Amino acid sequence: MPFQIVRNDITKMRVDAIVNAANPTLLGGGGVDGAIHRAAGPSLLEACRRLGGCKTGRAKITAAYDLPCKYVIHTVGPVWQGGQEGEKKQLASCYRKSLALAEKAGCETVAFPLISSGSYGFPGDVALAVASETIGKFLLNSDMTVYLAVFDRASFRISEKLFSDIEEYIDDRYADAHADRSVSRTVALPIEALTNATEAISLDEAVSQLDESFSEMLLRKIDERGMTDAECYKKANIDRKLFSKIRSDKLYRPSKPTAVAFAIALELPLAETEEMLKKAGFALSHSNKFDIIVEYFIERGNFNIFEINEALFAFDQSLLGS
Ligand code: AR6
């Protein structure tokens, strides 16, 4: 998954680089900065002394010493002053400069904490929106994998309005599902039925009798929409390698989050999403929060996979992509 929100202590992550939410002296502090320096050992402080500080919105790189990653990228986030002092732009710059340094150092995997969302006072939802948007834009032109490590639940927030809207939407649908018990079930692919029931025909023959497969439907829809493959898999938060696998394997069976991610990237309305999921053996149901949250976004015509993933994460659900 090119962009993934994870619940993790960043000092434990085995990625190429972790990013530190530092202060302009780069000489350590509390929060994630303190944790990184403790885990890296005193050599990190020595290396930081040689850097001569760092300006807000900029970033500098060092080795990682005793940490399990290779590099530490130190960036200085802005202090929140109410939102009118260019803080969001400065915060976006922290992500951009850090990613540029990571790229220059040849990193394939990078983990960020939610910069400025602790001592520096950014409201959690604003810090998250800036992080998500800036990382999302960067990934349009890069094959890097970027993690956003969320340490404590309190610092991770989507907007209160969105959270309560989704909560209400879930409550209504859960109630419906329980009232009429008409819960849709996962639909099995006909391949099992065909291969079990008809011993006389070969697998190849059975396959040729199948309808259009998931990957065939996906490729057809990409063409119909005039999208390039890259536009589609980037918008779906799908790794390039996985996409080539799907492209070359007519019978590829995606996971449900992968299948939904493609439906979102293609901006399919609900009925077409269902049709596409069915090809992979899945259905959307009102007895499951993941499905209801996906439905909420599709019904509103919001196909931004990163926003959907923020909401899914806030409700402890699997993320879209692969
Ligand atoms: N792993 C991942 N995230 C963490 C960890 C961890 N081990 N520890 C804390 N966080 P903060 P800032 C989260 O205050 O707001 C320092 O003193 C934390 O929950 O560390 O940019 C510096 O020296 C929060 O969501 O950084 C500066 O003076 C996020 O990391 C100042 O704090 C950032 O919180 C920078 O403030």
Image: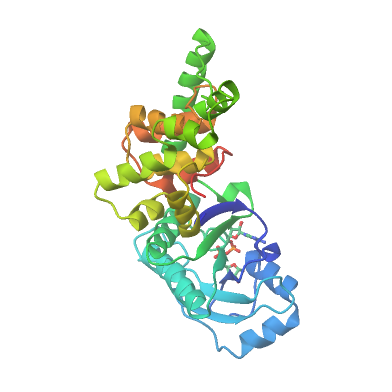
Q: Position of residue 293 (x, y in %)?
A: 46, 33
**Residue at 28%, 51% in the rendered image:** 227
- x and y percent of residue 248 in the render? 45, 52
Q: How many marks?
A: 0
Quarter for ligand 1?
bottom right
Picture layout, residue 147 above or below residue 188: below
Colour theme:
rainbow
Q: In this picture, is 212 found above or below 134?
A: above
User: 160 and 224: which one is in front?
Assistant: 224
Residue 165 in view, yes or no: no
Q: Is residue 212 above or below residue 90?
A: above
Say whether residue 302 is visible.
Answer: yes
**Is 300 in front, or is 55?**
300
Q: Is residue 183 left or right of residue 29?
A: left
Seen as rendered, the residue at the extreme bottom is: 50
Q: Position of residue 199 (x, y in %)?
A: 59, 25
Name the spot of residue 268 as percent of width and height, x first: 33, 36
Q: Residue at x 36, y 34 (%)?
A: 298
Which picture quadrant has residue 278?
A: top left
Residue 253 vs residue 173, the one in the foreground: 253
Residue 279 occupies quadrant: top left
Residue that extends furthest to the top in the rendered view of this protein: 180
Question: Which of the pair 96/143 is nearer the observer?
Answer: 143
Q: Residue at x 32, y 40 (%)?
A: 267
Residue at figure coordinates x 37%, y 39% from the top left: 217
